[in-house]
Image (cartoon, rainbow, N blue to C red):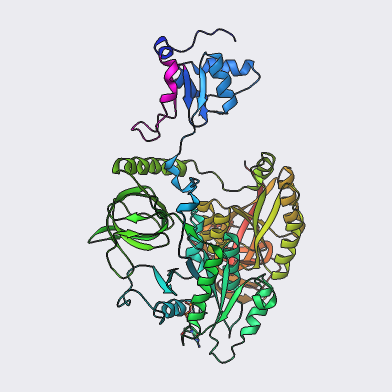
Amino acid sequence: MKKSNYGPKKSDQKKANNHQESRVSNFSNERKKDYAKVNGGVFLYTKPLSVGDLSKAINVPSSEIIKFLFLEGKMVTINQLLDDDMIGEVCLQFGYDFKKEEVEDKTHFETLKIEDDPASLKERPPVVTIMGHVDHGKTTLIDSIRSSRIVDTEAGAITQEIGAYQKEVDGKKITFIDTPGHAAFTAMRARGASVTDIVILVVAADDGVMPQTIEAIDHAKAAGVPIIVAVNKIDAPGAKPQKVLEQLMAHDVIAEEYGGDVMTVEISAKKGINIDALLEMIALKAEMLELKANPSRYAMGTVLEAELDKGVGPKATLLVQNGTLNAGDYVVVGETYGKIRRMNNEHGAMLKSASPSTPVSVIGLNGVPSAGDRFMAFESEKEAREIADARALEKQNAARSGTAAMSLSDLNNLIKAAKVQDVNVMVKADTDGTAQALKTNLEKMSTEEVKIHVLSASAGAISDNDILLASASNAIIFGFNVRPDARVRTLAAEQKVEIHLHNIIYELLDEMEAALKGMAVVEKVEKIIGEAEIRHIWKMAHVGTIGGSYVRSGVIKAKSKVRLIRDGVVIYDGTLGSLKRYKDDASEVKEGYECGLTIAGYNDIKEGDIVECYALVEKED
Ligand code: GDP
C-alpha cells in the first residue's frame, strides 16, 4: 500500500483494539452527525457518503480523495455519493481500516422488517373496507352492520365517536373502516400505508357493474387485497343478482359458483337481509387469511383520521396493526410525537390497552398528523422526540428535492440496474375499445426481465382517483385522446405521477417500447399554452359557430394548434380559426379575459367545452 501523509492520529491508534465496543448509536443526540466517524483507526459508517462527508470524517482533503480515485480510474465530484467499494479503497489508501455498521434505523420504522417469533404471534381481527359505486348502498350497509343483531359486547353501542368500529361474530372481532369508497383507501395507499385485509365490494343488483365498481376492483387488485362481493338491493324491483356475477366475470372477479375463488352474498342493506351471512363470510375469509400479529411488542400502526379539537388539542384515530398500545406510551406519529394521555374506543369508553386491529381515538400528541401517517410506540419520551425530529427534518428535505416516482425516461436504467422488474401502467382512452386494445398491446411488450402490468384500462377523463392509484402503485399513466384538466395536472405534479398523452396509437406504443429499450424518448413534446372555457355559443352565416370564451389559464393565441375537450375527452384536434376581443381581431388573449373564437373547419362547439391551445416544443431535460 502506498504511504500517505494522512492517517489515523496517534490517539486514535491507541484505541484501535477496542473498536468493537463502540457501536454507532443511532439514537444519541448527535444522531444526524453520527453516521460516520473514526474510532481507533477504524472508520465506521452507516450509509453511503459523499466525498465531502468522507473527507471531513477521516480528515483528508476532498481534493486528495478525488485525486486518488481519479488515479484509480474513477471520476468523482465532491457531492457524489461513494459506494462501499470506493469508501473502502479510500480508507485503505489513507491508512484506516473500515467497517460498515448495520444499524437498525428506527427513523423509518415503517420499513423495518419485523420478524416476530412465530410462538408470539396471535390471531388478529381482519380489517375491512367497504367499496363500490355511488348509491349502491355502502353507507346503508355500514349502518346496517353497526346495528346488526349479532351479539355486541359493548353495552348501548349506539353512539360512535370514531371512523372505525369493531363487531363481534361468533366470539371473534371484525374491524370495519367507516369511510366508504376507494378515495380514502387509495389516498392511504398512496402514502405507503395498507390497512385493509378484505374489501367488501357492494354492487346494486338493480344497477349492475358501474364505473366505480370497476375502479374499486382495480384498486383492490393493485393492493393485493381479496374481495368479497355483496350483491345489494336484492329486495328492489328489477334486481338481477345473477347478472351482476356475470358482469363481474368480465373484470376477473369470478364467483365461487362460477368456479372462481371470490365469495359472494346476496344482501339487502336496507332491509337487513343476509347481513349476518356477510359477517360470517368475512370471519371465514379472515380465518383462511390466517391474520396474525404479536401483541407483546411496542405498538405500530396507521392514522385513520386526525383533527385539532378545540378542547383537548390534537386528536387522532389510530389503527393498531401490530403490538399493543398502552395508555401512557410514548409514540411517534408521522412527524410528531407525544404521550398517549387518553385512549378511547369507538363508544367513548376509556381503554388501558389496545391490541392488534383495534381502532382507538387518542389524545396527547404534540401535533396533528395526517391520515395515512404511520405510528410506533417507543421506550422513552427522549427516543420518541428524537425520531420525530429526524423524520420532520427528512420530510422538509424531501419536499425540497422531490424526485419522480416512476419515469419513462429512466426506465431502462432502472431495468438495467435490476431495480425494476415490474412496470405498472394505467390507460385512459376516449373509448373502451381503444383502452382495451392498448392494454393488450402494452402487456405484450413484457419480456423476461420486465413485466408490464396494466392496472386499469378504461374510457374517460383522467381523474383525481387515477392519480392517487398511480401514485400508490408507482404507475405511469398513458392517456389516449383524453386531457387531464389543470386541477388533475397539479395533483399529478404533487404526487409525482407521470402522464403521457397521445393521439396516435402507434406513437404511444413506440414511446413505451423506446423507454423499455432505453432509446431516446420522443424529442418533441406538447406544451399547453392556455385554456379557455366556452361560455356562450352563437352561430353566424359564413363564419360558423363562435364560442364566447373565458381564458382560464395561460394565453390563447391566434392560429395556434387547439384541442376541443368535453368532459376530459378530446373531441377534436385542429387549429384556431378566428380570435376576437369584442369586434377586433386579436393576436392573443390572456388569462382572465374574454374572447370570441372559432375552430377552423369545426362547428360542434358546446357550452362548457374547453379549448386548449398547445405548441410542439423541444423536450427539455
Ligand atoms: P352509497 O352512495 O353507496 O353510500 O349508497 P347509500 O347507502 O347512500 O344508498 C343509496 C340509496 O340506495 C339510498 O336511497 C338507500 O336507501 C338505497 N339502498 C341502500 N341499500 C338498499 C337495499 O338493500 N335495498 C333498497 N331497495 N335500497 C337500498
Residue 484 image point, x, y percent:
58, 61
Q: Residue furthest front?
A: 119
Residue 543: tell me if it is visible.
Answer: no
Quadrant holding the N terminus: top right
How many numbered marks appear? 0
Foreground pick, 71 / 530: 71
Is residue 18 in the magenta section?
yes
Nearer-the-camera pick, 427 or 232: 232
Residue most extreme to the bottom: 237
Where is residue 418? Give x, y as percent.
Answer: 67, 41
Relative vertical location of residue 218 with respect to residue 229 in this rendering, above or below: above
Name the foreground residue: 429 vs 226.
226
Which residues lie in the magenta part? 15-41
Q: Is residue 289 above or below residue 473?
A: below
Q: Is residue 186 magenta?
A: no
Task: Classify 141 as above or below 565.
Answer: below
* Quadrant of the image occupied by residue 452: bottom right
Q: Position of residue 159 (x, y in %)?
A: 31, 75
Point 60% across, 68% down: residue:
217
Pick the front one: 186 or 196: 196
Q: Is residue 137 left or right of residue 242?
A: left
Q: Position of residue 322 (x, y in %)?
A: 43, 55
For residue 431, say whether it is visible: yes
Quadrant containing the C terminus is top right
Q: Residue at x 69, y 47 (%)?
A: 524
In this picture, residue 169 sits left or right of residue 69? left
Instruction: Give the residue at x 49% y 41%.
Output: 401
